[in-house]
Image: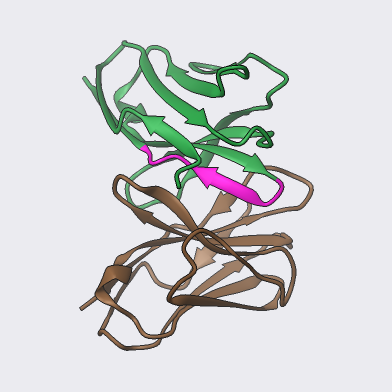
Chain colours: A brown, B green
Amino acid sequence: DVKVTQSSRYLVKRTGEKVFLECVQDMDHENMFWYRQDPGLGLRLIYFSYDVKMKEKGDIPEGYSVSREKKERFSLILESASTNQTSMYLCASRPQSRREAFFGQGTRLTVV
Amino acid sequence: QQQVKQSPQSLIVQKGGISIINCAYENTAFDYFPWYQQFPGKGPALLIAIRPDVSEKKEGRFTISFNKSAKQFSLHIMDSQPGDSATYFCAAYYNNDMRFGAGTRLTVKP
C-alpha cells in the first residue's frame, strides 16, 4: 500500500510565525504536490515537484515556499503565517508512470 | 481561474436513488479525468477515471460519462448507499498539471 504521511493532523500557529508542513511518501514517487482545500474552492495547487530539488509554482504560491532535498520528502513552508492561510493542507504523490495520485490525510492549520 | 467547474456543491439523495455530479473543463489538452472520493478526516482517494477516447466507463455502481465535444463529464452513482456519503472531486490532468473541481458533498439518506 502506498503511504503518504503528513507530519501533523492539526496545527495552531500564531500570525507571523514560520511554519513547516512535512510530507513523506514511501513509494519512490517522482512527483509530489501541495494543495490547500477550502470549502467551495476545492483543491488548489500551491506547488509541485517532479524531482529532487526541482519545484514548480501552482496557482496560489504567494506566501509559501517548498523544499525537496530528498525524493521521499516534500516540505511546505509558510514564511510568515497569516490568518488567511488557515486551511486544510493536502500533500499528494504520483509516480511518473501512472496517473493516480495518492493523498495524505491532511493537516488542518489554524493561524491565530 | 477555475479550469474545472463542478456542480452541484451539495446533493442529498435517498438510499437506492441515483446520484449525479457534473464537471466541465476548459483546457482541451487535459487527457485524464479522474474522480476522487473523500471521507471526513481523510485525504481524497481515487474512485474511478476515464480517458477522452472513451465515452463511458463503469466500475460496479459507479459510472463516468464523458462528452469530449461538450468538454463535460459526469459521475453517476447507482443504487446510492449511506456509505457513499462523502465529498466527491472531479479532476483533469495534463502531464503534471492536475486541476480539481470545487467538490460536491453527497449525503445519502437511509
Say which residue appears at 45% left-offset and 47% top-offset.
B1
- Foreground pick, B6 / A89: B6
Q: Is residue B64 left or right of residue A82?
A: right
Query: Magenta segment, which residues?
Result: B95-103
Assess whether residue B39 is covered by the magenta stretch: no
Q: Is residue B58 visible?
A: no
| Residue appearing at x 58%, y 51% in the figure | A102
Dividing the picture into quarters, in which one does residue A106 lie?
bottom left
Q: Residue at 40%, 51% (x, y): give it.
A: B42
Percent across and percent down for residue B2 are 45, 44
Q: Residue furthest right?
A: A97
| Residue at the farthest bottom position | A17
Residue B20: quarter of image: top left
State whether residue B39 is above or below residue A76: above
Q: Position of residue A63 (x, y in %)?
A: 43, 76
Residue A25 image point, x, y percent: 62, 64
Tally the numbered discs. Answer: 0
From the top left corner, tell me how far across and down residue A105 is, in percent. Answer: 44, 57
Q: Can residue A23 be seen in this snapshot?
A: yes
- Magenta-span inclusion, residue B97: yes
Q: Is residue A46 above or below residue B88?
A: below
In the depicted view, which residue is nearer to us: A23 or B33? B33
In which quadrant will I find the C terminus of chain B?
A: top left
